[in-house]
Amino acid sequence: MASKSVKQQPKIKPETLPKSEEGSSKTKKSRSFPIVAIGGSAGAFPSFEKFFTHMPADSGMAFVIIIHLDPDHKGQVAELIQKFTSMPVVEAFDGIAVEQDKVYIIPPNKDMGIHNRKLLLLAPSKPNGYRQPIDYFLQSLADDQWNRAVGIIFSGMGSDGETGIRMIKEKLGMAMAQDPDTAQYNSMPLAAISTNLVDYVLSPEEMPLKLIQYLNHPVLTEEASDQVRTAIQNSNSIQKILMLLRSQTGHDFSLYKKSTITRRIDRRIAYHQLPDYISYVGFLRENPPEIDVLFNELLIGVTKFFRDAPAFESLKNKMCALIKHKKHGDSLRVWIAGCSTGEEAYSAAMLLIECLEDMKKKEWPKIQLFATDLDAEAIDHARNGIYFDNIVADVSEQRLEKFFTKRDNTYQVKKELRDMIVFAQHNLIKDAPFTRLDLLCCRNVMIYLTTELQKKIIPIFHYALNPNAIMFMGPAETIGGFTDMFVSTDPKWKLYERKEGNPLMGKMIDFPFHVAKQYPLISNKMDDPEKLASKSSVADTFNRILLEKFTPSSVLVNDKGDILYTNGKTGKFLELPNGEAAMNIHKMAREELRYVVGNLIHQARAQKEHASINDIKLKEGNKVRLINLKAMLLEETGLQGLVLVIFEDRGLVNKPSRSKKASEQPSGIVEELEKELVYTKQQLNSTIEQMETSLEELKSTNEELQSTNEELQSTNEESLTTKEEMQSLNEELMTINMQYQAKADELTRMNNDMKNLLDSTEIGTIFLDNNLDILRYTPQVRKLFNLIPTDVGRPIVHVVSNFDNVTLENDIKEVIEKLTNKEIEVKTKTDEWYRVRIMPYRTLDNFISGAVLTFTLITSYKQLEYKLETLSRYTDDVVNVVTDAVIQLDGEYNVKVVNKAFLDTFSMPAQDVKGHDFIAILSAYTKTDKVLKMLNKSQKTHTPESAQVTLQGSVNGKYKFTAVPLRDLKTDQPSLTLLTITKEQD
């Protein structure tokens, strides 16, 4: 039963999770972590965003996204999904191992499968045709991961994913579908939901919490230890569940494999978040509809057309060899047991037709193909013969054209193929088998049954088959030890040929009505056993007396007329037929009653009420027995659809007396009956003729309608072809549009970031194209140019600036032509100073498409610069007044300032001193070690130092060198030195 909700769900945080869920996200890595496959197509990106923004990054799951992509478009899905989650998102490559808490994306133009948790990439099976990548991966995931597989279907057109969901459920996995009301395109979710196998129907933001709760339930995790499992099995809870199932559905699952039953029950317990089996028993008793859901869960039958294609090729060869010996008038009988929704039955029918056509037989044998299953809903689906268009992945184009009719997004089986098959509900365990079979297909049914039951069913199959007939089983099934009954003709694909076996084998066959224990239908309400015991003896005796003494003879029959139960003495009305014994009222009724009984039962069923006929005469020697016949359609629980036929015996009466003359004549009564019979036959013939006339008229009308329909169908097929092409193109455009939309959103965010950055820097900026037209500007520029929003697109030279006799046109053109940066300082009419930086505008592909101008306010800098220049001139004047030689050195001892006395003393021009290394200059007059040591010490200790130095040459004499450390006003560091050189007197 699917759960549906559209309630808004907040993003999951660890503190909001139940303890089991929170713990799961913190536990160590596990090899058995779930793998969640998410399929989507058109309109799926919003769903991905909502899903992953609500999914914790440490959920312990791995995620694989399968999405319809344009084969020729470069994949950008990983980049888009990465914006929604902090989990690593990667595009899958061949052989990559799946890891927890990571997201994998299918590449464009690839099919993808999985084996041993490694993703495998394959070239598309139909490169230019109809592809089903979601179905393909889900089937592969189900085979590889079983109950650790999860399939989710999001928005999309078509039905891709429908078959994959069936496979996931067959292998005990979990399935989710997006609520169609929340999907932009609901075709894919609706197709998945139509399987009736989806566990939850939710909006994308609700899925993560439900997924975590389900997968972390104790009955599904590794923490469910053997000890816990043993305790469960030792209880009688499972037996109670089976009893409730049998009570409500009439079907006994006690001979199904316990492991299969417990896994299915585990899933329901996890679905309802119940603590244990005992609680689930109580839940079943309080909620009878859940019993039907569990029944359907146990009956999950997954199939598809030509499942295991090589197996069907092998079967076709065997069938053709079998048909070769059939003549016109011979019967060819086939039984498909466990046919589920009919795909396997139609596959076998197609193979039969192809074999007969290949042999070019003019006259075909009489084909009788029976397809049965326990699931009534599956049988109804098979009878309709309508399947989603994803069957194109399994059925060739030739077969689709020959055997199917395309209707919108479905294919319907054509009438010729449909009429070959009789579909019926049938219980393999307790119903009698079909016999005289040439082919019996029973695939993937025996694997769910216990070994004990398999040993009883295989001999029954042997009994049902003709000599040398074929039995076709699933790839995981065998005949066990019954090698004396069958010989294997294809060990890989499990094709067997019947052989005679032991002559006594027939006597040892345990027929279905002996195999299954017969249990009375009981109520869900379990009465106290002691009360039942006290009531049973009196009630049983009383009921027995009523049945024997006061109720008329009666029989209970099903829709086929098979007698299920008798009451009273019915020998006066029913008798065993000659030949093969048959417990069927139509065959056992006395000749006078046979037509009347059949008509009465038909009348009761058609009118759904009681029907009766009185004064029916039965000959018994010289007397006539009069009876009244009644038929009642039963509606009581457990007996729906059965008919109770009641025989009221009114006793014997004498035949009318006859004179001798009359006695010599043929019996008047006989004549009367013969006349009545003739009249009845005439009426019947007349009715038949009228029906045939009406039928011919209907056929004529139908042929006209078919002719019109063919014309419409031809037009419709052309429209459908165009529609499919447009739909495919639309899906590709939707995907590309989503990618472009994401890029547009990204550009918008970047643009906002850039705007805020430029605004926050308070730097005016103008963007120009190659023609010097304004592309955009920041608000700060309005202080420098008289700009309004409509000036965008105008040349900047046409805009009046606030600069004082400055034009930028030539500078901008120079930058664009030479591709070099340029800086200038300009002054406004309001005495503000700006540094203008002009740079080429480079695109990402290194193409020059204009220039960028930035305007930085430097008024305060210029004011400081002016003050420094003034101070420097003042310092120079002061230094030049001093009669001693004075110089100022920087940290590298280069001369920054020199006075006139120094130049006169050393007879050197200013250009040879200023900016030069003082130590190098001094080396021409003396050794510099003492002076250098003094300077270093002064710099290190930040204290004045002095030294006596003897100079040679033109300045011959002794001098006192005094070094005083100074602080640099620009860096505020004591990195300058004022050096005074004074000549000492002799």
Image (cartoon, helix red, strand yellow):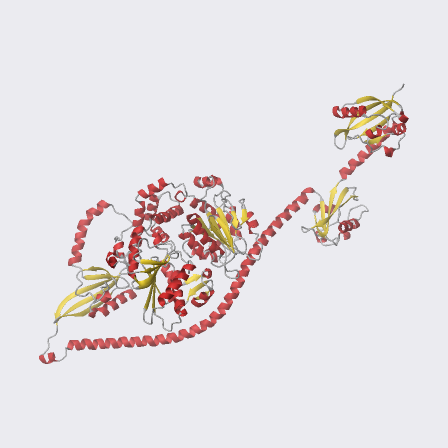
* For residue 61, above or below residue 341: above
326 displayed left or right of 952: left
Q: What residue occupies the far top of the structure in this picture? A: 986
User: Measured from the top left, where is residue 58 in percent x and y?
Assistant: 50, 42
Residue at image x 27%, y 51%?
Answer: 522
Residue 7 appears in the rendering: no
- Quadrant showing the C terminus: top right
User: Measured from the top left, where is residue 74 in percent x and y?
Assistant: 58, 54
Nearer the observer, 962 or 872? 962
Residue at image x 76%, y 33%?
Answer: 970
263 displayed left or right of 976: left
Residue 618 appears in the rendering: yes
Nearer the observer, 630 or 167? 167
Q: How many marks?
A: 0
* For residue 187, above or below residue 953: below
User: Measured from the top left, where is residue 459 in percent x and y?
Assistant: 29, 57
User: Measured from the top left, where is residue 713 in percent x and y?
Assistant: 47, 69
729 displayed left or right of 363: right
